[in-house]
């Protein structure tokens, strides 16, 4: 059975996901078979495995760092918020149903067998499991029936490293306050502390570290610097939404309230001279060279939001002048009508943006499949992409058909367990598809950037043409190198071998 170590944090955003990914990379480099695990994740960014099962993208990122294929075993429970008080509950990769928060709080204990089964299967296949907690273990109102923090640690007898975020301030109070609110048995399970996201001269911090160890009665196993590592982060905490600088080539992504799978745009973010901005106001579209309507967990609600704040009218104004691209929910919005006869979202019907001749009916069954294929003969600005290979995945609740003949854009030759199919639509510089990750493969993203630059009459120097996967792999190595330099890995290995 695998050795196990768990990363818990003093709060959401303390850096748990990144530290888990870094430890996975280090253990992989040291020759171990390693896998990440998070019993319950809440996120709108999700992924479809080879088996057609749905899981959180944070564990996909960590699996990539570990050099293994993502498996739903790594994230047996995924909660996808549908509104402020409820979520779609996904268990073992399949939709269980929608629940209010209070309802799920009472129900979640019934999912412990699913959590244990997934973990035990992973433990049979790996040497080390790195577990990630959620939020804080000191949320005393949530302690009862906990399945993701100390409750999870107790299930598998995991030693815990507790992480605090010094960048937000008050890190000593974070760490000591968390320890104070733990029970004695929980406190014993904490084997070390980590100060994360440090900027500046560490010698100034050293007296505080000494006092932290004295008052907390726990060793500090690392002071980790603030890292500029370009990997996917948690959707609710990402700093990507705050970037507003407009560069030579500018891509504006509509940041509606229920945005999902914005990771589709990550491939553009590491290119020099390219800005990817998440926008909420119509005025922010003015300088954009490309407008992207990403996925949405509530297509009808987010379309109404765009209609009310003037975003829809602004986008339609740019039809034929700017490149407009819709993915999944964004693709549905570009059509003429969206119907919801089964009350999957809002119920009833809603006029679409009328930029593509499409009619979507939301259905109760969810399409989940990895896809491979090629781009068809494209017209207009994206014509140079014609014939290029692509791969990604589909995850949506809805069927879309044409209301009049229009050219499609993707020939899907491998559609999970089903037959091949043709997907998407294109007309008048407006393109749309259900395929997430369509920009990631080969040089599709760099070709789009070159086309946008040419249209604008600018030249981008040092435009990288390396495969996105290769770039991402180098980022994981950089993450591991940084952690090795600032964590006491000898102490981490000793904690890993802890026995109660």
Image (cartoon, grey):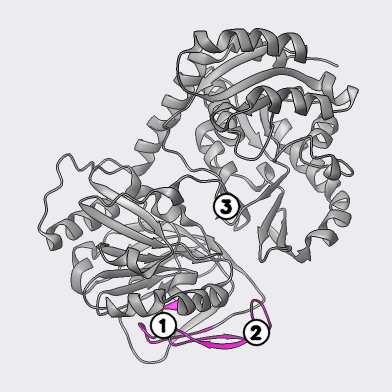
Picture residue at 57% right of the left edge, 21% below the top: 27
Secondary element under disc 2, as helix, strand or loop, is: loop
Residue 450 covered by magenta stretch: no
Is 216 placed above or below 97 here? above
Q: Which residue is mark 1?
A: 353
Secondary element under disc 3, as helix, strand or loop, is: loop
- Whether residue 112 sits left or right of residue 451 in the image: it is right
Front residue of 95/104: it is 104
Disc 2 residue crowd, few under 14, some 14–19, many 20+, Cα 10 Å: some
The x and y percentages for residue 339 are 57, 86
Q: Which residue is mark 3?
A: 49
Q: Which residue is mark 2?
A: 347
Which of the two discs, 2 and 1, labels the residue nearer the N terminus? Answer: 2
Which of the two discs, 3 and 2, labels the residue nearer the N terminus? Answer: 3
Would you identify the image quadrant in which residue 132 lies? Answer: top right
Secondary element under disc 1, as helix, strand or loop, is: loop
Which label sits in the foreground, 3 or 2?
2
Which of the two discs, 3 and 1, labels the residue nearer the N terminus? Answer: 3
Disc 3 residue crowd, few under 14, some 14–19, many 20+, Cα 10 Å: many
Q: Measure how far apart labels 3 and 1 are at the Cα level.
A: 32 Å
The x and y percentages for residue 300 are 55, 78
Q: Measure how far apart labels 3 and 2 are at the Cα level.
A: 30 Å
- Whether residue 136 sits left or right of residue 63 in the image: it is right
Front residue of 259/175: it is 175
**Decide: marks 3, 1 in contact (CB < 8 A)?**
no
Q: Which residues are magenta?
A: 332-360
The x and y percentages for residue 354 are 39, 86
Picture residue at 45% right of the left edge, 30% below the top: 476
Picture residue at 89% right of the left edge, 43% below the top: 144
């Amino acid at each position: 059975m695998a050795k196990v170590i768990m990363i818990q944090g003093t709060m959401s955003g303390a850096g748990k996901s990144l530290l888990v990914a870094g430890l996975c990379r280090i253990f992989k480099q040291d020759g171990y078979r390693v896998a990440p695990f998070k019993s319950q994740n809440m996120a709108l960014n999700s992924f479809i495995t080879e088996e057609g099962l749905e899981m959180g993208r944070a564990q996909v990122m960590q699996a990539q760092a570990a050099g293994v294929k993502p498996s739903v075993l790594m994230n047996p429970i995924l909660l996808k918020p549908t509104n402020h008080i409820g979520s779609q509950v996904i268990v073992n990769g399949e939709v269980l149903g929608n629940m209010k928060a209070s309802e799920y709080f009472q129900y979640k204990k019934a999912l412990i067998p699913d959590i244990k089964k997934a973990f035990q299967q992973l433990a049979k296949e790996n040497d080390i499991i790195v577990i990630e907690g959620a939020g804080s273990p000191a949320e005393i109102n949530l302690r009862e029936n906990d399945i993701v923090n100390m409750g999870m640690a107790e299930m598998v007898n995991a030693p815990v490293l507790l992480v605090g975020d010094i960048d937000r301030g008050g890190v000593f109070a974070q760490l000591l306050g968390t320890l104070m609110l733990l029970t004695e048995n929980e406190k014993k399970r904490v084997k070390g502390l980590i100060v994360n996201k440090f900027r500046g001269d560490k010698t100034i911090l050293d007296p505080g570290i000494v006092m932290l160890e004295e008052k907390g009665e726990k060793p500090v196993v690392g002071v980790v610097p603030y890292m500029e590592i370009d990997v996917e982060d948690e959707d609710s905490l990402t700093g990507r939404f705050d970037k507003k600088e407009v560069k030579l080539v500018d891509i504006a992504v509509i940041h509606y309230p229920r945005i999902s799978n914005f990771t589709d745009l990550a491939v553009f973010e590491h290119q020099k001279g390219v800005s990817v901005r998440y926008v909420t106001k119509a005025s922010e579209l003015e300088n954009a060279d490309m407008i992207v309507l990403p996925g949405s967990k509530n297509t009808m609600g987010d379309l109404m939001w765009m209609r009310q704040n003037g975003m829809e009218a602004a986008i339609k104004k740019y039809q034929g002048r700017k490149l407009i691209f819709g993915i999944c929910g964004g693709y549905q919005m570009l059509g003429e009508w969206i119907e919801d006869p089964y009350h999957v979202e809002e119920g009833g019907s809603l006029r679409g943006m009328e930029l593509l001749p499409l009619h979507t009916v939301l259905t109760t069954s969810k399409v989940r499949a990895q896809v491979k294929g090629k781009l068809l003969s494209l017209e207009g600005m994206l014509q140079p992409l014609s014939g290029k290979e692509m791969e990604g995945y589909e995850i949506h609740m809805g069927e879309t058909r044409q209301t009049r003949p229009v050219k499609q854009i993707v020939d899907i030759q491998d559609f999970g367990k089903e037959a091949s199919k043709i997907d998407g639509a294109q007309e008048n510089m407006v393109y749309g598809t259900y395929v997430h990750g369509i920009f990631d493969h080969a040089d599709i993203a760099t070709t789009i950037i070159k086309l946008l630059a040419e249209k604008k009459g600018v030249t981008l120097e040092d435009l990288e043409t390396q495969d996105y996967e290769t770039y991402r792999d180098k980022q994981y190595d950089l993450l591991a190198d940084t952690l090795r330099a600032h964590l006491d890995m000898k102490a981490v290995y000793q904690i890993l071998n802890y026995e109660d």
